[in-house]
Image (spheres, rainbow, N blue to C red):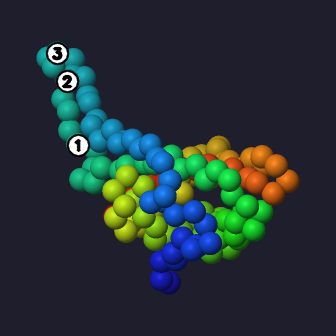
Amino acid sequence: MATPNWPATLPQAGSLGGAGTLQSNVISFQPEVGPSIDRRRASIVQRTHEIELANVTAAQYADFVEFFDVTLFSGVLAFNWVNPMTGAASKVKIVQRQGENAYREERITPDIYKLSFTIMLVR
């Protein structure tokens, strides 16, 4: 199955502000004596970015819900988008932490919505 693309009808990451974070890649063990023993957790460091789509129209909201529910199989699949920090083409996935919702939706007016979610860059 080919990796789907972010819908062209929705705001593009390059036009959004963004904030990202680097996940910790260090595991520390404390022996009975001496300094801690540290090692890398993995060879790839994951980066996450908080995405907020403000002023989304009702049609764009419907496109996002369709994309998430149908195309991404409720957020299971990764998709092609743009890294919000660098503008480079990237493969990303919407982060779904156990016990939390995949995205937040807010209705601002009858025709304007706000969507927010976290993406992780997938290599």
Do callouts 3 and 2 mark residues in contact (Cβ within 8 Å)? no
Distance from the alpha carbon under mark 1 to that under mark 2: 13 Å
Q: Is residue 98 visible?
A: yes
Q: Position of residue 37 (x, y in %)?
A: 18, 29
Q: Decide which of 45, 98 is in the foreground and name it.
A: 45
Please state which amino acid type lies under the numbered disc 1: Arg
**Res 33 label:** 3
Return the residue found at the far bottom: 1
Residue 2, placed above or below residue 92? below
The amino acid type, in three-letter code, at marker 2 is Ser
Q: Is residue 122 visible?
A: no
Please name whichever residue, 49 or 87, is drawn nearer the observer in this view of the structure. Answer: 87
Q: Which of the numbered marks, if any, corresponds to residue 40? A: 1
| Nearest to viewer (mark 1 / mark 3) | 1
Query: Between marks 3 and 2, how big is the CA–CA gap?
Result: 9 Å
Determine crowd level at label 3: few under 14, some 14-19, many 20+ residues with C-alpha closer than 10 A.
Answer: few
Q: Is there a contact, CB below 8 Å, between mark 1 and mark 2?
A: no
Image quarter in which the C terminus is found: bottom left
Name the front one of labels 3 and 2. Answer: 2
The answer to whether 87 appears left or right of 118 in the picture is left
Image spot of residue 84 (x, y percent):
42, 55
